[in-house]
Structure formats: structure tokens, C-alpha cells
Image: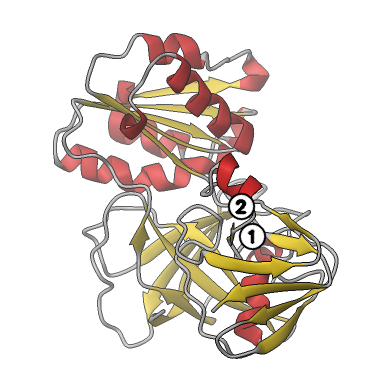
Amino acid sequence: MSHINVKVAAIEQVTDLIKHFTFVREDGQPFPVFSGGSHVVVSMNINGRIQRNAYSLMGNPEETEAYHISVRRQEKSRGGSVHMHDALKVGDSLQITFPVNLFALEKRARKHLLIAGGIGITPFMSQIADLERNKANYELHYAYRAPEHGAFSKEIKANIGNKLITYVESEGGVLNLRNLLSKQPLGTHVYVCGPGPMVVAMIETARTLGWPENHIHSEQFTAPPSGESFKIKLTKSALEIVVPPEMSMLEAMEAAGVDAPYLCRGGACGRCELEVVCTDGNLLHHDHYLSEAEKAAGKKIMPCVSRAKCDLLEVVL
């Protein structure tokens, strides 16, 4: 993928666990215009190993002098968020991809129902700008554990007023998805981003209530889990690559010089999908893209987040 060379212009500690990063282009040019819900993939060098993580773009998509992302520190992650929090300094250089939107607003919707949990608020920050500019009908429902974890809630409230409804768990706030979804007018589209259980609950509730599938939108990037080492063979080149326990298949291929396709690197978009030729073990699927039937068939795998428990996995690439 094409990249943009950027430098860190500012870092803000938003909460104890969340930092906000402002990037500007190293060549001094404006960034490309993007649409609400877009993300970029940030490349970082962690002890000599390149790791790439996807982060939602925030702010007004039409203000292109800078890009903004926020990162929640995840102690149990593979180190990307910890690196961003502990190692990155103002003035440091990075590479990011051009924006990609896998969580776009449906322009024909009669109403937009936005549901955020925790750090899942970030993609909605740019969507709000689009919705306000277009004078669209929308509500933002934002759930978080305690007041100190409500990143950007005051800023959003000042911007959109009563269109923001918050649910603070420590104060007894409960987001009743069934009640919320059951009273929406026809033509409403719902969007959710947040912890896995919230995303799954929203999708299942909407389906149970009979919402059309194309009115249900979600975003959830999964970090690739660690596992046992195994070897992959690429049929077109006959190249064999060892996938270490701490790397994804995609990262191992990239480290070996393979230009493998990707967009989200979080198991959501399907761009990196590979055809499985054979394996002497079991596939371990962790993506949100393949259906349960496709996973059971064992003919496809998403190398950005999935892996295998085997000695050798052969794929078409």
C-alpha cells in the first residue's frame, strides 16, 4: 500500500489510558480529504520489528492540515499501544497509509443511530462532523465505565448538545439496546463501535428485532493473537515462511519481503483473504469477516489475525 511520511506534531493525555496524537505531513502538504468513519494504518518500529495498527481518524474530514488519532493503552496487547504511549515523542517520524473507510455513513438513511463504547468513540468523531455539515438526523449513544473514562464526552456535548446521550456505568447508567433499537423509525441505520461483547450484542439485538441487514453497521478491529509457531508455504513462489508465536501470518510474510494485500489488518474487511490449499493441522480463525460456514469449510483464512495449529499451512499467494 502507498504510504504518507508524517511527523508527530502534538500529543495530549486525554485520560489515564488514552493519548491523542496529531500528525502533519513531513513534506508540508495537506493530507487527503477523508470521509467520516475512515481509518489509517500506522507503521511503527518496535525493537527492530515493524508493527502496523489501524486507528480511526478523528476531527473534521475537510480540515486536512493535520490528521488526528487516539490510542488506548492496552497492557495485554502485543506492544503497539504501549509503544505509542511510552516511546512516541513530538517530532518523531512515522509512516501511515492513505485513509480507507470500512465504516461509512449511509447517505440515504432517514436517521443515523450511533452507538459507542469506550475508545469506540473515535470513528464517530469524524462522522459527527459529516452529519452536522449535512444537517442529518442522528443521535450518539456513548457508554463508558466511569466519568474519568469518558474521553471527549465534554467536547462532544459542547458540539452537539442533546444529540449526545451518555451511560456511565459507575453512576448506574445502562444502555438498553433492545429498548433503544425497538423505538427507531423506519429507515434508520445503526452503527456500533466498541468492545466485542457490545458489538455482538447490538448486531444480534438488531437482527432479532428484524432490522434489515444492510441497515446494521459495525467496526471492530481485532489484534492478532499469539500462538504456536508454524510454517506457511506460498504456492505461487514456493516460498516457505516461519510464523513465530508473536507475529501474525501477514507480518511474517511482510518480514520475508512478500507484498501481501491488506486494508484494516483487524479481520474486518476481507482484503487479505487467502485460499487454503492444505494443512496438517487446524485453522484458528479470529476474524469478523468469514461466516461460520466458511470458517468450518477451512478453505479460506485471514492472515492479518488468524493462524493455524499445525506444522505446515499451504496457501495461494
The residue at which mark 1 appears reads as 305
Residue 114 falls left or right of residue 259: left
Residue type beneath disc 1? Val
Q: Give the image location of residue 29, x and y in percent.
A: 26, 81
- Which image quarter holds the N terminus? bottom left
> Callout 2: helix, strand or loop?
loop
Depth check: give the residue in front, 165 or 298. 298
As drawn, the label of residue 259 is none
Q: Give the image location of residue 56, x and y in percent.
A: 44, 55
- Which image quarter holds the C terminus? bottom right
Q: Please report the residue visible at 67 percent of the width from the left and 47 percent of the height from the top.
A: 16
Residue 285 falls left or right of residue 103: right
Contact (CB < 8 A) between labels 1 and 2? yes
Q: Is residue 313 visible?
A: yes
As drawn, the label of residue 222 is 2
Q: Please report the residue visible at 33 percent of the width from the left and 68 percent of the height from the top.
A: 66
Residue type beneath disc 2? Thr
Quadrant of the rendered image containing residue 64: bottom left
Q: Is residue 51 visible?
A: no
User: Taking 112 as reference, is 53 above or below it?
Assistant: below
Q: Give the image location of residue 39, x and y in percent.
A: 41, 59
> Callout 1: helix, strand or loop?
loop
